Amino acid sequence: MRALETVRSTMSPDIGLDLGTANTVVYERGAGVTVSEPSVVAFNTLTDEIVAVGHAAKEMEGRVPDRIRVVRPLRRGTISDFRATHALVGTLVDRALATRPRLAPRLVASIPGCATDIECKAVEQAVRAAGARYTTYVPQAVAAAVGAGLDVTSLRAQMIVDIGGGTTEIAIIAAAGVIRLSSIQTGGDFLDETVQQRLHAQHFEIGRITAERLKIELGYAGRPPGRQPVVVNGMDVDAASPRSREVSEEMVGEALREGLERILRGVCSVLETTPPDVAADLIESGITLTGGGALIAGLAAEMGFRTNVPTTIAPDPLTCVARGAGEILGSPTLLERLRPHADRLTRWYQSLRIGMRESYSP
């Protein structure tokens, strides 16, 4: 039996998929993260053909003629362009498994807590289009917790905050179940937009890629770490010509303040409704940060200060959701306990979201 399982896993691998607003990550059990690329697709509008997917498509953004349309098919954690999403998932899964012969994989995808029934169906269709022989879905926050190395089956409550490109998932988990869940429609993309808006107010235009770079290099929560200004290139609106300028750490921090405050308020809101015994557990187990936003300087310390709960950053936070989704497939008992019943996520999420959903729109 073990030999048969080994053959099956070799030929028909277990795949965890983090279909994120900013990046899509593919994780294969036994092989690790095999693909991590931007969630971007480029089409030729004249022929309707796919020109590029992932890194190559992102490099085209803002730099190509009108006949090339560059699409980000997910917005705030949900699908906004069905065809582009199908192309994205199918291409990246094929890339992940292209090095050896295989059967159709088993695949677990993560779903944000703010997803509607229609949006869940859209993800289902996109995953099926990738050729998976078996698909199921788990909450994004639970997948992030498993990928961060937390024991989600423990009776001791643990808190996970996954700051992705489109949403921030906040959950308290115990006994392979979700005690509290909040999904905030604020993430890395919103933070990038606020950096662009701050510079626009100073009559200087930059692109999305430059704004993301500034967020990564100079963004912070709490006190500024004291980093040197960064020189960026853009468009001087008043002079109507290209130029370079320095951007200070303080300016980027001010731009990010609103978005980070939304996230911190969301975490505090979940904690305010937490039962006393669960709160006592969290003092011991703490808050674990995952997702790209976890890497913003000072955010873990600021969250710990605001909540009075120790806060740490998970190892390799960018890939936690995909890793967790893939590892869940390797535990049939855990998978069965997490797998939604009947209409997959529909009834399950409806019960979780009653009174718990915190949505902030920019």
Image: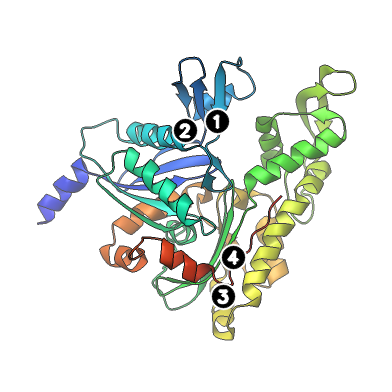
- The answer for how far apart the CA atoms under marks 4 and 1 are is 29 Å
- The answer for how far apart the CA atoms under marks 2 and 4 are is 28 Å
Bin the neighbour count of mark 3 within 10 Å (Cα to Cα): few under 14, some 14-19, many 20 and up. Answer: many
Which comes before the other along the chain, label 3 or label 4? Answer: 3
Which comes before the other along the chain, label 2 or label 1? Answer: 1
Identify which amino acid the numbered label 2 is placed on: Ala
Residue 71: which disc? 1
Q: Quadrant of the N terminus?
A: bottom left
Identify which amino acid the numbered label 4 is placed on: Arg
When the figure is inspected, residue 154 is found, relative to residue 338, above or below; the finding is below
Number of disc labels: 4
Is label 3 or label 1 in front? Answer: 1
- For mark 1, give the secondary structure: strand
Residue 84: which disc? 2
Residue 239: which disc? none
**How is the structure coloured here?**
rainbow
Residue 357: which disc? 4
Q: Are marks 3 and 2 in contact (CB under 8 Å)?
A: no
Residue denoted by label 3: 282
Identify which amino acid the numbered label 3 is placed on: Leu
- The answer for how far apart the CA atoms under marks 3 and 1 are is 41 Å
- For mark 3, give the secondary structure: helix
